[in-house]
Amino acid sequence: MIRGVIIMNDQGKPRLIKFYEFQPVEKQHELVRSIYRILCSRAENVSNFVKVDSLFGPDVRLVYKTFATLYFVFVFDNSENELAMLDLMQVFVETLDKCFSNVCELDVVFNFSKVHTILDEIILGGQVLETSSSEVVKAVEEISKMERNANSILPASWQGR
Amino acid sequence: MAVVPSLMDSLFQRSIDDVIKGLRLCPPGTESIFISKSLDEIRREIKSTDPQTKATALHKLTYLHSLHSAEMSWAAFHSVELSSSAAHSYKRVAFLSASLSFNPSTTQVILLLTHQLRKDLSSANPHDVSLALSTLSAICNPDLARDLTPDVFALLASGKPFVRKKAIAAVLRVFEQYPDAVRVCFKRVVENLESDDMGILSAVVGLFCELTEKEPRSYLPLAPEFYKILVDCRNNWVLIKVIKIFAKLAPLEPRLGKRVVEPICDHMARTGAKSLAFECVRMIVTSLSEYDSAVKLAVAKLREFLLEDDPNLKYLGLQGLTIVSKTNMWAVLENKELVVKALSDVDVNIKVEALRLVMCMVSEDNVMEISRILISQALKSDPEFCNEILGHVLLTCSRNFYEVVFDFDWYVSFLGEMARIPHCRKGNEIENQLVDIGMRVKDARVQLVHIARELVIDPALLGNSFIHGVLGAAAWVSGEYIELSRNPFEIMEALLQPRTSLLTPSVRAVYIQSAFKVLTFCLSLYLKLSVDTVASQLLSDTELDNGNGNVVVASSSMHRFTKESFVNLMNLVETNLGPLAGSNEVEVQERASNVLGLIKLIKLIVFGSEGDNVKGEVEASEMVKLIFDAFSEDLGPVSVNAQERVPIPDGLVLKENLGDLDDICGGDTEFSLPSSFSIVKLQKMDAAGTSDCTSKEESETLTESTSLLAEHRKRHGLYYLSSENAGTVSNDYPPAIDPKDKDADEAEDLARLTEESLVIKKKPNQARIRPVVVKLDDGEGFNVSAKKREVEGGDLISGAVQEVLLGNEATATSSSSRKRESSKKSRERNKQQHGHGKERKSQSTGKDKEHDGQGQREKPKRKSRQRGDGGALPAQSSVIPDFLL
C-alpha cells in the first residue's frame, strides 16, 4: 500500500503531507526533513527510487520526482509496483496541471484543501482508486460546482481558484 | 477568558489566503510569532455560531497544523460540530481537519462522529459518501469500524461504481480494526471480483493484494477467481496486483505455479508496459524459479532492462538479478560484464545493487580477482561507496569461516592493504578478522605476523584514528605470535614508539601488553643460553608450528642474544614505559606497572649480584618459564556452547540429582534436609571442579600464575575472541574444544580431503592445500530462530476469511461483540452462501467447474468435524485441486 504522499519545494518546505497511517504531526515533519536530506543529496538524472527502511520499516521505498521547484514523493511498500508508482505520480501531477491550468508551486501553496481533494480521488487509505486524470478532474469539478451552487450567496473565498 | 466573537470578527476575519500570504511575507525567523498570533485569532473565531466563520477558522487551523505543525487537538470537537453542516464545502473542511489531525487511538471525540459518518455513508450525494469513506479510513478505530460495518457492507454493492470502489478501498481499514467485519462483508467483497468495471476490479484486487500480504494461505480458495482475472483482464494496474497475489499464493500450492506460469509469460512477452513486464519478471524469479524456460525469458527481459538508458530500469533490472541469483546463478554470470560496468555508474543505487551482485558471484576461484577489481574501484570512489565496497568484501570473504578464501597469505595481506585505504572506516571489522584468523588458521600466522609488523612499524598510520582498532589487532598478533617474528627487537621498538601516545587508551593497553609478551619471550631466549629447558621447549614449539624456512632463520637469529643487547632492550622498555606508570588511564597505568615490575625483578635477580649469577639465573628462569608458559598456551575461538561440552563425570546423574534438588528447594516437603542439600551441592561443585581440570590442556598443569594470567586475558577478551562470540560468551570455562584437538582436526581434514578431490578436478593448477580453519561445529554462527508468526489483526482477519470461505462454523473466535450480532450475521451468512452458490453455478460453463464449486464446500465440511481448533492447513490445500487438474 501507499504509506504517504508528500509535496515539498526544493528548500525542503512541505506543501502537502498526507500519511495513510496515523503519525503525530511532529513525526511527520521529522520524516519530511529526513526525506529532504536524502533527496537533496542525490544527483540529477539518477534513478528515482530510494530505500527508506530506516525511516519507515522493512521493505518501504519511496519514489520521487522533481517538477520545477517541487519534489513529489510517494512512499510505498511491497504491495506496490515501483514503476506503477511513478505512473501514478504522473497522473497526480497531470491532474493538478489540468485543475490549475499550468500548475506551479503557488497553486499548490494557495489551494491546500483542493489539492487534498484531488489526492483523495486518486488514493484512499493507501489504495489506488483512480488512474485516469480526466476522471479525477471530472469528480473534482463536480464537487466545486456543487459547492458553488450551494454557497452562491456566501463569499467562499477558500474555494479552488 | 472567553471572548465571544463579535460581528466585527466575522466581518474582518482573515481568510486562509491572507494567512498564507502573511506567512510568506514574514521575515525569516518571525514565522512562529505570526503563527501564534493567527492561532489566537482562530481560537476566537472557531467558537462562532456562524458556520462560515467557523469553517474558515478550522480551515486555517488545519493548514497550520499540517504544514506548520501547530497543535490542534483542542479543536477536535469543532471538527465534529462542523461536520454536521449541510453545506458540502463546510463538511469537507471538517472531515479534512479530522482526517489530518485525529489520532484514532487517543482522540475521544471520534465516537461523536459515528452518527454523522453513518448519515453521510447513506447519503444520496456520492461526494458526501466518498468524503465519509475516506475519513473513515483515515480515523478508523475498532469502535468506529464495528458500528459502521453494516453501512460499509451496504455500499459494497452500491450501484454507483464511484462509490463502490471507495467502499472496497475503505473496507481494508475496517477489517484491520474489527476482524469480525470480515464475516459480514467478505462474500460481497468476493463478488466484486467478477465486476466489469475496471475501477471496482482494481480496488478489489488491490484489497486482496494487501490481505494476502499477511496470511496468503487463507486466500487459496479464491485462486480460480484470480486466475480468471489473470487470463481475461487487460488492465495493467489490475494485472500487476493480481500477479502480486499469485506471487504469494504460488509457493503454497505447487500446482498453482504450473497453471499460472504460462499466462504470466504471455503477459511478459505481450505487454509494452515496463511496470507490468517487471512485475511478471519479479513473480517468475521469486515464486516460479523452478520453471527453467520461464526463468530464461525473465532473465532475457532483465537484460533488456539492463541495456536501457533509463536509470530506473537499470536499477530494477539489477534488483531483479539479485533475486534470481539466489536460485539461478547463471543469470548473473551471463550478465557479468553489464554488472561490472554498472559498478562505475553515476547513480549510487545502481552501484550498490551492482556491488551486491558482484559479491554473489564470488567463489574460491575468483575471489582474488574480484577483490582486486573492487579495491581499485574503491580507491576511485567517493568515501561512502568506498566503505560500502570494503564492507561487502569483508563480509563475503569471512562468510562461513572464510569459505571462499583458499590462500590465507593473500587474504591477510589484503586485509592489511584495505586498512591502509585512506577512506577506510571498516577498521573494526578488519581488526576482528585479523585476530580471528590468527586464532583459527595456524598456517596463516607467519604471514599474519609479517603483515602485523608492517602495520605496527609504520609511524604514519598512528595518526589515523580510524584504524587504531586495526593497529591494536596488529599489536596483539605481534605479541601473541612473537616466536614467529624475525626480529623481536624491532617489534619492541615499534610497540614503544613515541607516536603511540596518539592511540586511544584501550588500544595502547594492548600495545603495552604485547610489549610484555615480547619482553617475556626475549627473556626466555636470553636465559636459554645458560638454562636450556625453556628454550628447548620453545624451539620444539616453533618448529612444530612451522617447518618453514622463515622460522629457522628467525630462531637462529635469536641465538645471538648477548647480555648487552638484552640490557639495552630492558632499558628501552623502562625509559618508554616509565612515564606511563603515572598515567591517568587505569588500563595503561596498570599494564605499564606490570612490565616495569617484571623488569625490576629480573634486573635484581639476574644482574643484581655478580657472584651469585648462576643461581639468580636459575631462579629467574623458573619464574620466566611460568610466565612464558602462560603466554604460550594457544588461544582458540570459544564456542557459545562451550559450557555444554564440558563432559559430565561418571557417577553424576544430573537429572536425578537435580530432581532431588528441586524437591528440596521446592519447599513443599515437610522435612527439609539441610544436610542432604549440602551433599548435593558438594557433589555438584566437585563435578564442576573435575571437569574443569580434565578439560584443561592435558599437558599443562594448572599453576597459580597461569590461572592469574588466564584471568588477565579473559578480562581483555575483546582481543581474543572472534566477533561472533564477543559479549555473548560467558568465560567461566576454558575453551572446551582445544584447537589442537586431534579428533576435530581429523574430521576436518577428512572433510577437506573429500572436498579437495572434487575441487582439484575443477582446477588442477591449485596444488596447495587450503589451510585448516578451526571451527567449532555447532553453536557458532547464527541461531536461526524460527520466524515469529505475526499475531495481530492479519491473523484474525485470515481466521475470519477461512471461516467464511470454507463455511466452517467451528473455528469461530468468539468475542462478545460477535455474540451480540450473531443472529443477524448468521442470517446474512446463509443468504450470502446461497447467493454465492448460485452465482458459481451460473458462471460455471464446464462440468468440472461445477464440480469444483461443490468440492469446495463439501470437503472442508467433512474435515471441520475432525479438527478442533485452528489446524486448517490440510483442509485448505485440498480446496482447489479440481481447478488445477
Image (cartoon, coloured by chain):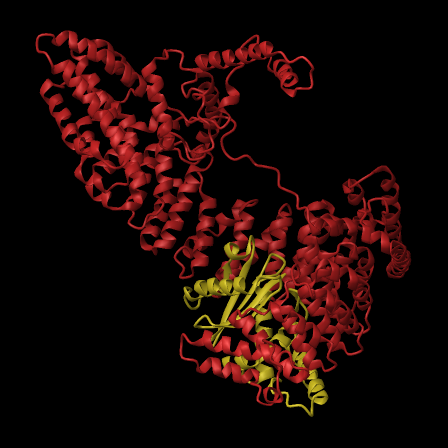
Chain colours: A yellow, B red
Q: Residue furthest bottom?
A: A153
Q: At which x and y percent is residue B816?
A: 81, 50
Whether residue B516 appears in this view of the structure is: yes
Confirm whether residue A112 shows in the render: no
Q: Residue at x 48, y 45 (%)?
A: B360
In the rendered view, would you say B695 is above or below B779? Answer: above
Q: In the displayed structure, does residue B113 sit left or right of residue B284?
A: right
Q: Relative to B711, is A21 on the left or the right?
A: right
Q: Please determine whether, in this image, residue B87 is positioned above or below residue B266.
A: below
Q: Quadrant of residue B626?
A: top left
Coordinates of residue B335 in the picture (x, y in percent): 48, 52
Left or right of B656 in this view: B568: left
Residue B231 falls in image quadrant? bottom right
Total numbered badges shown on the rendered structure: 0
Front residue of B188 and B133: B133
Q: Quadrant of residue B164?
A: bottom right
In this picture, is B353 found above or below B673? below
Residue in front for this viewpoint, A10 or B327: A10
Q: Position of residue B256 (x, y in %)?
A: 73, 49
Q: Residue at x 37, y 11 (%)?
A: B699
**Image quadrant containing the N terminus of chain B:** bottom right
* Residue at point 70%, 45% (across, down): B252
**What residue is at 90 percent from the left and 55 percent from the top?**
B823
Q: Which x, y percent locates residue B390? A: 38, 46
